[in-house]
Amino acid sequence: MAGRDVLKGIHNRIEPDLLHAMAMMGEGESIAIVERAFPAYTVAAQLPYKRVITISARTGDTLRAILSLLPLDKRVDCAATIMQVDDEPDFIPEALEETIPIIEAAGTAIQSADRDTFMAMALQSHVIVQTQDNRPHGNVILVKGTV
């Protein structure tokens, strides 16, 4: 069954735990999609959805799957936040180069945040989704809207 959708209209990367976590999110709550080096388990322990959801994919593929179901918040200027590289706030790492067009195609502007601000935002998220992306700095927070 690899590579096929297991439910009509549900991307095959959306596991039951992720589907449940996204369904439990309210309008204005956020989901953090992070790469392997992010301290996901430390952060998740403090969130409403206390477990880390791991997805065996790169950041871009994970975002495509999530955005196939998750509406972004239209009431905010930027429903997506990416984490800046320390001491290089204008540098766009490889993992984010491929995700920015995916996010923009979903209809939102993107803001960036320094590491400390991003971590504080991640601590306010509903759930953490950790990808298997080995490329550094591929971290994004999305704010859920309404359907």
Image: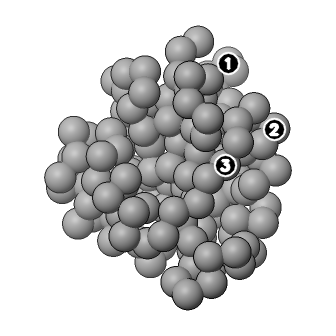
Mark 3 surroundings within 10 Å by alpha-carbon count, few (fewer than 14), some (14 through 19), many (20 or more): some
Residue at 35% of width from left, 44% of height from top?
Answer: 125
Identify the image quadrant of the C terminus: top right
Q: Which mark is residue 110?
A: 3
Q: Is residue 66 left or right of residue 18?
A: right
Q: Earlier in the sequence, mark 3 or mark 2?
A: 2
Front of the two marks 3 and 2: 3
Which residue lies under the disc numbered 2? 105
Secondary structure category for the residue under label 2: helix
- In contact (CB < 8 Å): disc 3 and disc 2: no
**Residue 66, how many percent across, how many down?**
60, 38
Amino acid on which the number 1 mark rests in the picture = Lys
In the depicted structure, whether residue 62 falls above or below residue 94: above
Residue pictured at 61% horizontal, 40% vertical: 78
Sooner in the amino-acid sequence: mark 1 or mark 3:
1
- Do the residues bearing badges 1 and 3 touch, measured as CB atoms within 8 Å? no
83 over 106 or under it: above or below: below
Closer to the camera, 50 or 89?
89
- Residues at marks 3 and 2, CA–CA distance in whole angstroms: 11 Å
State yes or no: discs 1 and 2 in contact (Cβ < 8 Å): no
Type of amino acid under label 2: Ala
Q: Is residue 51 visible?
A: no
Picture quadrant where residue 6 is located: top right
Mark 1–mark 3 distance (CA, rounded to whole Å): 30 Å
